[in-house]
Structures are given as structure tokens and as C-alpha cells.
Image (cartoon, rainbow, N blue to C red):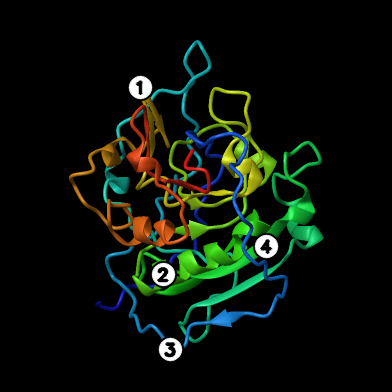
Amino acid sequence: MPRRGARAAALVACVGLALGGCAGAPAGRAAPPVSTSAAPTVSPSPVVATPDSGATAAPSWLGTRVLPKRADGSVAAQPTPPELRDRSIVTVDDLPPPADGRFHSTVEAVPAAVLARSSWTTACPVASSDLRYLTVSFRGFDGLAHTGELLVNKRAADDLVSVFRQLFAADFPIERMRISSTTDLNAPPTGDGNTTEAFACRPVRGQKAWSQHAYGLAVDLNPFQNPYRKGQVVLPELASSYLDRAEKRPGMIEPREAAVRAFASIGWPWGGDYHALKDYMHFSASGG
């Protein structure tokens, strides 16, 4: 890939997205062995990539323009701004990227400081001791290796490391991967969020049952390129152009391709196969 221009300095504000389509209590399944060591695992050989000039800096307004609410409190889907119709934003690093450009991962008990900035509280349906803090390498839209973080259920930790190792090897691009706080989840909607994440202590959209995210047993991958749709509801609200799945663009999840295959390898179905709604970003242990 050709060399890109100077790296963007602006931080991408991609939080505050309330994602939908996730099921309630997790289905029972045998728990795989859990790694409690913080020692990193590394891919056996480097994956060579060069910076991609097709990636661009985030628009200056990203994450700042609050969308108007309708009388019932909902937010209508909006046309996708021209700058985001082919979204390939340079990743701004929240954590130090891997210096050697290879895949690295760590699995450990959740540090107190990480738990404090997450959405976990004692009211959540999973104990903090049953969560694990993961760091994994991911490939950005800029073609470079970056480090992301996830909170996940301990029974899924090693499986999810395997998934993100596969995505890295396949050069599947991810814009941003970090843990959201309760404030982030409850922020006024800007409709342009694109944070890949797992744990979020919240119910299923429009229901009282806990989402699979509240157990750390679901992952939403590139929400903007892979929106949720049920009737007239679209999340993120500005991602309407990505409802056209025939127009393939980087970061989109496609049937039988890298992301679906990676999650299928650990038995997690894809929300793009739902019938009553489409949750293209969503993978979960229960399939709901």
C-alpha cells in the first residue's frame, strides 16, 4: 500500500453509542480454560504492512454534533455525511501500538483503574471477578498495527484472543477498540460512533432483559460500517449509507468472510443473519 500523509493528531470521539439487538441471560455452555496471566502472547512471525494513504483524519466535527430528538425521545436516522460514506479514519492510539508490527495479546484480571472507568457497577449481572481485561493488536484503516482493549467474560477471554488474532492476520481493518464508561453510554447521541467493544452494562434495546454485552459475552465490531436496523431505527443514526450491503467498503462484515469465519470458529453467530432485524456489528455467545 502507498505511504500515507502525516498522522492525524485529533482524537476520534466515538463513544456514547447505544447499540441494540443483544439478547438477555447467556445460554449455558462449557467454560474453556481461562488464562489469568498478564504475559503477552505474540504471533510467531511478523505481519508486514505499510501505511495506507487512503485513510484520512477524522472530520473536526466528529462526535460533537448532537442529533435532535423527536417528541417521543427517539432519534431519527439521518443521511450519512459525505465525509463518512467511505469511512476510513486514521486510528489515534489510546494505548501504545506494537513496536514490531506483530500481533500481541494479554489476558488478566481487571485492574481497579480499568474497572473504575468502565460501565461496570455492582448492579450489573456479572461479578467483576468474572470479567477479564484483554489487550489485542488490531489493524487500522491506516494499515498499521495498533493496540485495543476489551472487557470480556472470563469464559470467553481466550476464544476472543483467537478471534482477534485471526482478524489481524486477515488484515481486517478496525478503527478503534476501547472500553466505554457509563457516561459514554448515556451521552447524547451524535450518530457517528465507531468503537469496537464487548462489555457494556445495559439492557437489550427497548427491553428490560440484560444484553449479552452486560455479561461480556458479545462484541460489536466497527458499528458505523456495520449498523443495527430494526424498522425505522438505525444505529448509529448517521450510518444509513452502510445499510446498502451490496456496496462493499473496508471494515464491513460480509457473509462467509473473515470476521464471520473468525467468530464462527468459537461458535459465536452473527447478527447479520437475524431475520426480524439486522445487527451487522454484533456477535455473541448465545446468538442473541
Q: In this figure, which residue is indicated by the disc labeled 1?
A: 232
In space, the residues marked 3 and 4 are separated at their CA atoms by: 25 Å
Q: In this figure, which residue is indicated by the disc labeled 2?
A: 166
In this rendered view, identify the residue nearer to me: 130 or 104. 130
* Residue 176 x, y percent position in the rendering: 49, 58
User: Looking at the image, is mark 2 or mark 4 nearer the viewer?
Assistant: 2
| Residue depicted at 36% across the width and 68% down the height | 142
User: Looking at the image, is mark 1 or mark 2 nearer the viewer?
Assistant: 2
In space, the residues marked 1 and 4 are separated at their CA atoms by: 36 Å
Looking at this view, name the residue that lies furthest to the top.
71
Q: In this figure, which residue is indicated by the disc labeled 3?
A: 45
| Residue depicted at 58% across the width and 49% down the height | 217
Pointer 1 local density, CA inside 10 Å: few below 14, some 14–19, many at least 20: few
Tell me which amino acid carries mark 3.
Ser
What SS does tag 1 mark? loop
Q: Are marks 3 and 4 in contact (CB under 8 Å)?
A: no
Disc on the earlier residue, 1 or 4: 4
In space, the residues marked 1 and 2 are separated at their CA atoms by: 34 Å
Image quadrant where residue 264 sits? bottom left
User: Looking at the image, is mark 3 or mark 1 nearer the viewer?
Assistant: 3
- Indicate whether 157 appears above or below 198: below
Disc on the earlier residue, 3 or 2: 3
In space, the residues marked 2 and 4 are separated at their CA atoms by: 19 Å
Q: In this figure, which residue is indicated by the disc labeled 4?
A: 133
Please give the count of numbered marks on the rendered protein.
4
| Residue depicted at 49% across the width and 38% down the height | 288
Q: Are marks 1 and 4 in contact (CB under 8 Å)?
A: no
Tell me which amino acid carries mark 4.
Tyr
Looking at this view, name the residue that lies furthest to the left.
246
- Indicate whether 264 appears above or below 276: below
Disc on the earlier residue, 1 or 2: 2
What SS does tag 3 mark? loop
